Amino acid sequence: MKAIVMFPEGGMPQYVENYPEPEIGAEGQALISVQAVALKHLDKSRANGTHYSTDTPGKPKVIGMDGVGFLEDGTSVYAIGISGMMAQKAIVDKSRMVVLPAGIAPAVAAALPNAIAGSAMALRYRANIQAGDTVLINGATGFTGRNAIQLARYHGAKKIIATGRNEASLQHLLTLGVDEVISLQQPDDSIISRLKEIHRTSPIDIIVDYTWGRPAELILETLKGQGNFTHRTRFVTVGSMAGDTIQLSSEILRSVNLHLTGSGLGSWTKAEMRILLTEILPEMLQLAVEGKLKVDVQTLAINEFEKAWEMDVESGRRLVVVV
Ligand SMILES: NC(=O)c1ccc[n+]([C@@H]2O[C@H](COP(=O)([O-])OP(=O)(O)OC[C@H]3O[C@@H](n4cnc5c(N)ncnc54)[C@H](OP(=O)(O)O)[C@@H]3O)[C@@H](O)[C@H]2O)c1
């Protein structure tokens, strides 16, 4: 079968024409004919061994954690792979599948779930979003950030503030329901003073963070109190595009009513994961079919994969490999 394989020698994953098909190894597994697999940061960092969930290397491995395709009875599903999914066939866990709604494009169905996990789980379970909340999305210009904006609005956020670097992409966010955008391409003082003014007039309830690094340091500096009572802010980090570590002063944590947490594989309970698969994903995929959730994808055929790995994808878009 055609597959994209990471070899233990390293380098970038390779397109292979005659890779052996995987076989069902246990009860509860199913064989899927794959149609489309999104190339996400998770897949890239698992392939090059830098993600915390990476398997022990040593053997060639098909990349791609999740994707969409057909079961043997023809049912169209999104599934999380037991074997790597960027291949014509994959083995999936029957308990970690979602039947796709009619009318959804395979590339959209492949692109959305990771971004929904990266936004809905943070907003609903880590930040406990309530109607009327003021939400700041840091790194909102990315594919997952754009999804978070739309979900925050869907859950009744009163005000949404978005930060990002790409100016055109920031302006586009205003069409998705953002009330104010703040460029991360300005001096630190300007970012802090604008955020302080916003926090003074509309106290920020939730911060969903996709960058960590310096932008997160600036936001936390903004929240720092002066010994008076402060507004309770829930800060959820979901990604680390600007660096995996920050400097965090004890004074910030002591001077503000801050709940600082993270959302990702390993942080969710089994019950939350079950709700993601049985309720949240079906609901969001249906919203995408109805055009109520805007999704921007770019596709590439599997045999062109070499171009995909280093491709400069437009801000806010997801690259999807069509198998
Ligand atoms: N934990 C989870 O469940 C989960 C799920 C999905 C995603 N994630 C993580 O969330 C992050 C964003 O994912 P995504 O799908 O939105 O990726 P994406 O579509 O590639 O977007 C990347 C985002 O990061 C910004 N960015 C990149 N480098 C930056 C820097 N040095 N400083 C400031 N901003 C920077 C980009 O800004 P511009 O476009 O404005 O340049 C863009 O907003 C990744 O770390 C990803 O692994 C986590």
Image: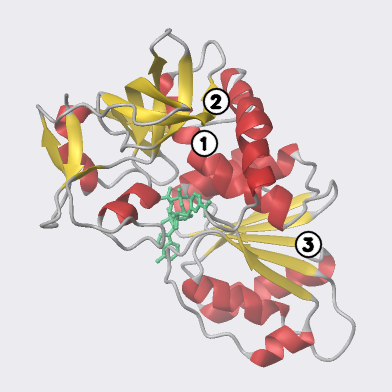
Q: Position of residue 44 (x, y in %)?
A: 30, 51
Lower position in the chain sequence, tag 1 or tag 2: 2
Label whose residue precedes the other's in the sequence (3 or 1):
1
**Secondary element at tag 1:** helix
Residues at badges 3 and 1 in contact (C-beta under 8 Å)?
Answer: no
Element type at marker 3?
loop
Q: In the rendering, which numbered label is found on residue 113?
A: 1
- Where, by quadrant of the figure, is residue 116 drawn? top right
Picture disc at residue 98: 2
Q: Is residue 23 left or right of residue 283?
A: left
Q: Residue at x 47, y 11 (%)?
A: 75
Q: Which residue type carries mark 2?
A: Val
Q: Residue furthest right?
A: 229
Residue type at numbered disc 1: Pro
Q: Which residue is mark 3?
A: 205
103 is higher (above) or lower (below) than 132? above
Q: Amino acid at mark 3?
A: Asp
The one of 89 and 305 positioned closer to us in this rendering: 89
The mark closer to the camera, 3 or 2, is 2
**Element under disc 2:** strand
Q: CA distance from mark 3 to mark 2?
A: 32 Å
Residue at 51 percent of width and 46 percent of height: 144
Camera-side residue: 63 or 319?
A: 63
